Image (tube, grey):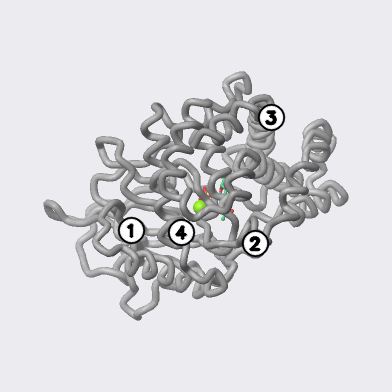
Amino acid sequence: MQDLNQIINQFIDAKVRLIEPFGSGHINDTYRVFINGENTPSYVLQRINTSIFKDVEALCANIRKVTGHIEQNLNGDKSYKLMKPVASKSGNDWFASADGQTWRVFNYIQDSTSIDLVCFPNQAKEAGKAYGWFLGKLNDFPHHELVPIIPDFHNLNFRLSQLKHEINFNPANRLKDCSADVDFYLTRSQDLLEFYGKIGSSEIPVRVTHNDTKVNNVLFSPEWKAISVIDLDTVMPGVVHFDFGDSIRTIAATAAEDELDLSKVGINLELFKSFSEGFLSQMKPFLTLEEKGALYLAPKLMTYIMGIRFLADYLRGDTYYKVKHPLHNIQRARNQMALIVDLERKTDKIKQILDKL
Ligand code: GN1
Ligand code: MG
């Protein structure tokens, strides 16, 4: 393993007390770095997965542009903090080590905590406000100035074609174990594809979106106030439905995305309402009527996209997501199926809640 002390010293001059694994991301390797002394700041060190984030320079430039734009738009607004990159001693926001790995460092936001499951409605409302605030601050950012860092990231047609490719080639010989799951997904996309066809119109405009609005990408204070939106790797052009839907997928869910007991998996309408209240308190002024009118479909859209990405990765033999065991991806895909079934069952209630906001 790399000497992480040497890596961190490419960014800061300080005596490191401890470096330990941090967070639960599926792509990059993340560590928290503690510095000697009392009340010293701490840092987040990350090894970037460059087989997924191929253009590190553009990745880092996107993050600088987005955080810079938000800072310019603050006008004294101190509601949330930004987790900013620390430049390396050579002046880049990354460092390439001799073994070909690429690293970066962020300032850790003091006294912050993240959660993998919401416990009470105010956490969902706080997360909604934070993600809504973040998108609101980027509402006037010209989206073409950002590099689409993972092209077609939430493109439903593209994700379906990737799944069909894995079904046809069956490279890990796993299709026999998941034909019912494949059938489920392939017969569930009609309404989503219809919505997808409207993206980019004046009714459903392209904006700058976060694109990974999981519950654990919001940091909370000890009093459960949301204090920061983190993980800006995938901030790029998108539609509001990506962020609203992906938030609901984990923030209003009754279980983690790899919960095995599918009877526990579903959508909690109270958490849904709280998140939506928080989100729309910030974002409603910026939305077209059609954007708001289509929000009800967003949780299914994003749960579906995640589900087929997990399923495709299972079929290809787990080359994209980190997995703890060989069934992890198929378990995630089945978990998302249970969530989709519950979302479909509750569509009318979801619409009623959104209509009142
Ligand atoms: C990945 O690495 P992490 O946990 O931030 C993925 C997201 C998925 C998520 C599923 C770049 O995010 O799109 O929603 O796993 N990020 C990338 O939990 O693919
Ligand atoms: Mg992420």
For badge 1, the amino acid type reads: Leu
| Residue 56: x %, y % from top left | 51, 71
Residue placed under numbered mark 4 in the picture: 232
Residue 62 shows in the view? yes
Quadrant where the N terminus lies?
Answer: bottom left
Neighbour tally class for label 2: few under 14, some 14-19, many 20 plus, Cα within 10 Å: few
Q: Which mark is residue 344?
A: 3
The one nearer the camera, 298 or 184, is: 298
Q: Is residue 107 left or right of residue 164?
A: left
The residue at the point 76 percent across, 54 percent down is: 157
| Circle 1 residue | 82
Which of disc 3 and disc 2 is earlier in sequence?
2
Q: Position of residue 29 (x, y in %)?
A: 46, 54
Q: Is residue 216 above or below residue 238?
A: above
Relative to 215, is 143 above or below?
below
Q: Which residue is mark 2?
A: 202
Q: Earlier in the sequence, mark 1 or mark 3?
A: 1
Q: Is residue 6 visible?
A: no
